[in-house]
Amino acid sequence: EPEVTQTPSHQVTQMGQEVILRCVPISNHLYFYWYRQILGQKVEFLVSFYNNEISEKSEIFDDQFSVERPDGSNFTLKIRSTKLEDSAMYFCASSEAQRVEAFFGQGTRLTVV
Amino acid sequence: GIQVEQSPPDLILQEGANSTLRCNFSDSVNNLQWFHQIPWGQLINLFYIPSGTKQNGRLSATTVATERYSLLYISSSQTTDSGVYFCAVVVWNFNKFYFGSGTKLNVKP
């Protein structure tokens, strides 16, 4: 069964460093998303991406964040200068179309120290 | 924005018991999914159920979109059912999930 895969599963980084979280969405999907879950809290939307551009972003997704689809298979989330409060689980998701079933990856746990 | 409320927030069951988890939402939706998550783990798709009823083994779900709620039934619970169950909805004209706060289930042997 096709699945969304994310790497790495866990990353520890120093405050102020740049991190890139990687995702391989399901191959025939056209819509891609990043969500974040701070420990013990609900899952929050960060950004959606379609046709090589951001279609929507939340207020959390400030200038420190960027997304890219560098090739036909990968979808990345970059955090330019990490802060302690960026520590969270980051989930990538993809869907064939808008407002249909979305599939989530296994997550990347980011720890900023 | 839309409010997604899940109840109960915490649930402790003895293995073999049945349970019903509820998700209420404050606006019309065109997508609703239920997920299961173990701590710091993957969001596992349980059901894509914007309306109607579905069953998968010991789990079933019902969404009554006109009354803005969904129910997740777990029958004959097992310790492996422990974790957090999230309901997430997509509102008309948007293409992002709003998640509830989850129901934390602990099934004891």
Image (cartoon, rainbow, N blue to C red):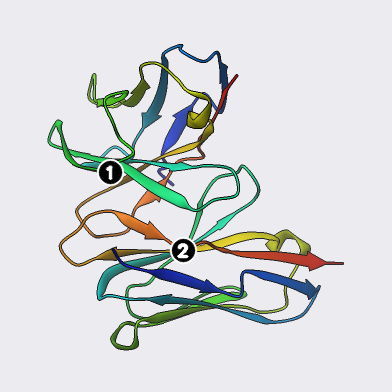
Quarter-of-image position of residue A113: top right
Question: The disc labelled 2 sits on which kind of residue?
Answer: Gly
Q: Which residue is found at the position 30% from the left and 35% from the top?
A: A61
Q: Label 2 marks which chain's residue?
A: B
- Tag 1 residue: A58
Q: Secondary structure at mark 2?
A: loop
Q: Which residue is found at the position 34% from the left and 39% from the top?
A: A60
Q: Residues within 10 Å of mark 1 (few under 14, many from 20)?
A: few
Does B90 appear above or below A87? Answer: below
Question: The disc labelled 1 sits on which kind of residue?
Answer: Ser
- Residue B67, position in %: x, y? 34, 88
With B8 as the anchor, is B96 left or right in this view? left
Label 1 to label 2, Cα distance in Å?
Answer: 17 Å
Q: Which residue is found at the position 62% from the left and 42% from the top?
A: B40
Q: Are marks 1 and 2 on the same chain?
A: no
Does B53 appear above or below B45? Answer: below
Looking at this view, is A92 or B52 the one in front? Answer: A92
- Tag 2 residue: B100
